[in-house]
Structures are given as structure tokens and as C-alpha cells.
Image (cartoon, coloured by chain):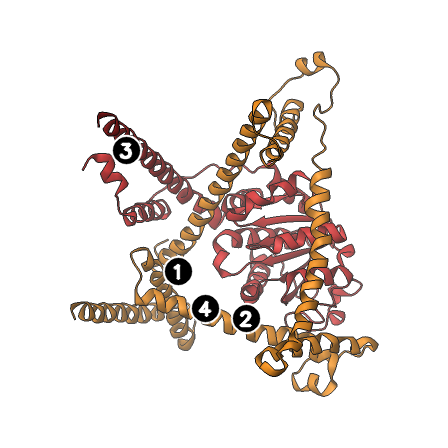
Chain colours: A orange, B red
Amino acid sequence: MTSKIAMRILTAIVALIFLVSWITRSGSGMSDSAFTNVRDGFLITFAVFLTLSIFSFLYRDNPFYKFAESLYVGISAGYWMSYGFWSTIVGNFVPRASRSLSEFFHVPYQERADHILIYIPIIFGLILLTRLLPKIGWLSRWSLAFIIGATAGLNLTRYLRSDFISQVSNSFIPLFVDWKGAGDFVSHISLAADGQFIAILSNWVIFVGVMCGLVYFFFSKEHKGAFGVASRIGIWILMITFGASFGYTVMGRISLLVGRITFLFGDWLNIL
Amino acid sequence: MTFHDKLLALDRRWVFLVLAIFVILPILPFVKFSVPVTPVKEVREIYDFIEGLKPGDYILLSLDYDPGSMAELHPVAYAMLEQCYAKKLKVITLTLSATGAQMVEEIVRDVADSCKIYHGFKPERGIDYVYLGYKPYPGIIILGMGMNFRIPFPQDYYGTTLDSIPMMRGIKNYDNVKAVINLSAGNVSDMWVADGNARYGVKLALAMTGVMAADYYPYYQSKQVFGIIGGMKGAAEYEKLCKNPGSATDAMKAQVFAHVVIIIFIIIGNLAYFLGRRKTAQTQESE
């Protein structure tokens, strides 16, 4: 009972703050049109409400957070669906399918001889929807088979090229860059980023890192002796990689926080 | 309860509060200090590449992120687009993120408007830049554009057919653009590398959120991409190169404070953990 009263009081306070913010923001609008100022005031206030509702989860789960989360999921799904319709069905299919439909949707009709081909994906798309009808639901397997087969085939060739062949071939790097003998190397040694010493060091790090990383994942031989040492170096390389990734993740998350705080203090409170 | 027991039992909401204070504090107007920003090679290479292009050269900017990643990628988008406009390049923009369509349109329009103030001319839609809009299924779209931009994008965002846009006449596919710069907050970058670069050999550079950056450096080392702008730090570096300090440069102050706080918390947490472990070991020994 007490928590219900507390929730009502909290909701009333939030509503009051929302109203005051809306009125204040509408009054300080930049546009000559009163309607635009009132609308912008509402939009900024509502965005602030949603931001703070999401942040409130850090304290604990609550109805404001749940409302903001549900609103986000619902709007995203609806937006994506309607945008898909207008960009793909109206944008790609209608201009190629029918002159009268193009006129109806106000998109320019495109006359081309190969238009008949667009009916193949249309048919596949329609039979995918037969999953909704249990009696003929098996038809949808044809579409799924096409999607899985085409995706597997495309991914095999493209990732083989970009993530395997290119990566392997580019790992074959010279371990002694511009090598003209030890004397020349020692006399020209420098710590410049584009210098010979750093280039050689970088290539050795890559070479040792790749070899030791591979050794760590080689399980057909016991990790003992020199093999064990290489494996230990491999795990260190992996840990350093995860550390770099974690560092970037922290920076990314803080960036998002900074973005929202800048919005709250700048766009809403106008103190930045 | 000993001190380290208290530390280990600390409610994580205190950590959130301290972090929030140290992120808010440095961005307040009365806190005046700046963080030195030194552009790294992978960021500079993108800047130098664009600077090296001639007026009238075509460049494709694929802004594949949504409002959730604005804080990290907006600064790069604004700085890079302004650089391209100022260089009088022909800029083809598009997005492969559904919730980014209107946001990207706003960027393209905003930067064109600001060019009039800062550079004395306003790039014209259809002549200096084109915005193709959004289409779903990024991999298929990237492959389609490799054959002809008109396959996935018969019209631009505003419904104008590509053949009736002056800038797009004679522009067929990636062969006609000098490079593709992909600003991404998801796995679309993978598709640009696999479908754009590996399949069609398009010259590619990536700007991405901090979370993604470490995963894409192998592509830079293997020269599959010619530059990487990673997260807000990369954005600040790009702003510095463009001599156009903006929100990313300002945010570096908060980044420094936040990172120091996080490092201190990590040290305290580890200290408490090891002290606790030593105490447990001593207790077991005495028993």
C-alpha cells in the first residue's frame, strides 16, 4: 500500500517536472512560429524523460524504465516495418511492376525488359508467409532453403576471400625491413614511428603473435617445453587483445554517456 | 567487517554515481582545461586521402549507424562531410541502417547549410551531393551497388530517379568512385570489407564505434582498409586534422576523467580482492 502511494507521488512529481519543462522550453524556442516552439519543447522534454527513464534502471528496475524500453521496441519495430514497405515494396517493386501502381504511389515507372525477374523474389516472399497457414506451411521451406543456400554460398566465398586468404597472405611480411646489413641498421637506428627499427619490431610482433596464437589453439600436442612457452606467449597475446578491446569498449560506453549528458545539460538545461 | 570486506560488498550504484559525477564535472562550462589530441597514422591516412582528391572526384559515404551511436559517429560524419564539400568533391551518401535514414538526411542537409556560412558556398543537392536513402539487407545492397547503383537505389531518398540527377549521370558503380568511407555502428563494416573490398576491390576506410574498433585493426594491417577512425578518440583526432574542433574534442575531457576513475576503481577492486584472498589463506592456515 505504501509503495503504491509512493509510486503515485513519484509519478505526480515526474508529470509536474515534465509540464514545467515543456512550458519553459516552449517559451525559450528559437522559431517565430508558436506551434513549432511548443512542439520542439514537447519533443525535447519527452526525450529527456525517456533518457532519465532509461538511466533510472541503474538504480533499480521500475515502471518508467519498462515504459521507455517497451516504447523503444515498439516504435523501432513499427518504424522498420513501415520503412521496409516504403523503401523496398514501393521503392523497388512498384516502379518495376506496374504503371498504374507507380502512379498511385507517386513513384516514376521504369520500363525495362527484365521486369519479369522481380516476380521470382515476390513469389518466394509470398510463400514464406504460408507459415501462417498450417496446412500449406511446408511451402515456406522452399523460401527458407533458398535463403539458407544463397547466404551460405555467398558467405563462404566472400569470407574465404576477405577473412582467410587476404589475412593469411598479408601475414607473410618481411622480418627484416629494408635490411642492408647489421652495420647499416645500427648506424641508422631511430625510434621514429616510420623508421626501420619500428617497422622491423612491428613485423616481429605480428609474426610472433600469429605463430604463438596458433600454437595456443593447437591441441593435438601437449603444451610442454618450447611448445608450452609458445602457448603461454599465445595466451598473453590473446589477453592483450582482449584488454585493448575492453579499453575501446569502456571508451565507447563513456562516449554514449557523454552524449546523453551533453544533451541533458546542453539541449535541455542550456548550461553548456 | 574489515575495510576490504566493505569494499568488496560496496553497492555498485555508488560506482555509477561517482562515475556520473566525474563525467559531468569536466564538461561544465566553468571547468576550463583541454586535452592534447594527437592524430594517429590510421586516422591521418583517411584525412590525407580526402585532401589529395581533386575537385569533382566522387566519394561514397555510407553512414550506417543509428541515433544510438550519434555521440561517437556524428562528429566524424560532420567533419568529414564538411571536408568533402569544402574540397568540392561529389559526395554520394547513403545509409544501411533503418533507424538512421532521417538522421543521415539531416546531417547531409545541415552540413550543406553550414558550408554557406563557413566556406561561402552552398553545395547543391543533385549537383554536389546526393543522398540515396536506406535499403534493407546491407550485404545484398553492397553487392548490388557493385554492379550498378540503380539496382538497389532506382531513386534517391527524395524519390528522384538516379538518371535524372545531374551528378549521377554516367556514374554506374564503385569503379566511378575514388573510395568508400563507411561509418558504422554494427556488422555492416564486415560486409563492406567482404563484399565491397574483397569482391569489387573498392578502396575502403572505416570509422566505427569504440566497441568495434579493436576487431577491425587486422584489416588495416592487411591493407584491406586504408584507414580506421576508432570511437570518440578517433573522431577527436579527425576534428583536429580538419581544424574543426567539435563535440568529440570537448568530450575528451570527460573521457580522461572517466578513464582515471575506472582505473582507480579497478586498482581498488583488485587490491580488495587480493587482500581478501590473503586473509582467507591465513585463516585456513591457522585452522
C-alpha distance separating marks 4 and 3: 43 Å
Judge from the rendering whether residue B116 lies leftward or rightward of residue B225; answer left or right: left
- Label 3 sits on a secondary structure element that is helix
SS label for mark 2: helix
Q: From mark 4 to mark 1, how far is it between C-alphas?
A: 25 Å
Q: How many other residues sit within 10 Å of disc 4, few (<14), some (14-19) or many (≥20)?
A: few
Question: Which residue is labeled 3 in the image?
Answer: B276
Q: What residue sits 42% from the left and 48% below the top?
A: A254
Q: Please provide percent x and percent y for residue B41.
A: 61, 37
Return the residue nearer the eye: A191 or B143: B143
Give the CA distance from mark 2 to mark 1. Answer: 27 Å
Q: Residues within 10 Å of mark 2 (few under 14, many from 20)?
A: some
Q: Which residue is mark 2?
A: A80
- Residue B275 vertical placement versus B237 (above, below): above
For label 4, the SS is helix
Front in this rendered view, residue A181 or A159: A159
Residue type (three-letter) at the residue carrying disc 1: Asp
For the residue marked with disc 2, what is the amino acid? Trp
For the point 67% across and 75% down, which residue is it? Answer: A91
Residue labelled with disc 1: A267
Label 2 close to label 4 by CB (< 8 Å): no
Q: Which residue is mark 4?
A: A73
- On the same chain, marks 3 and 1? The answer is no
Q: Nearer the viewer, residue B209 or A107?
A: B209
Say yes or no: labels 2 and 3 on the same chain. no
Q: Where is residue A266 shown, x and y percent of the image?
A: 38, 57
The answer to whether residue A166 is above or below residue B66 is above
Q: Chain of mark 3?
A: B
Of the 4 image quadrants, the one containing the N terminus of chain B is: top left
Q: CA gap, disc 2 to disc 3?
A: 51 Å
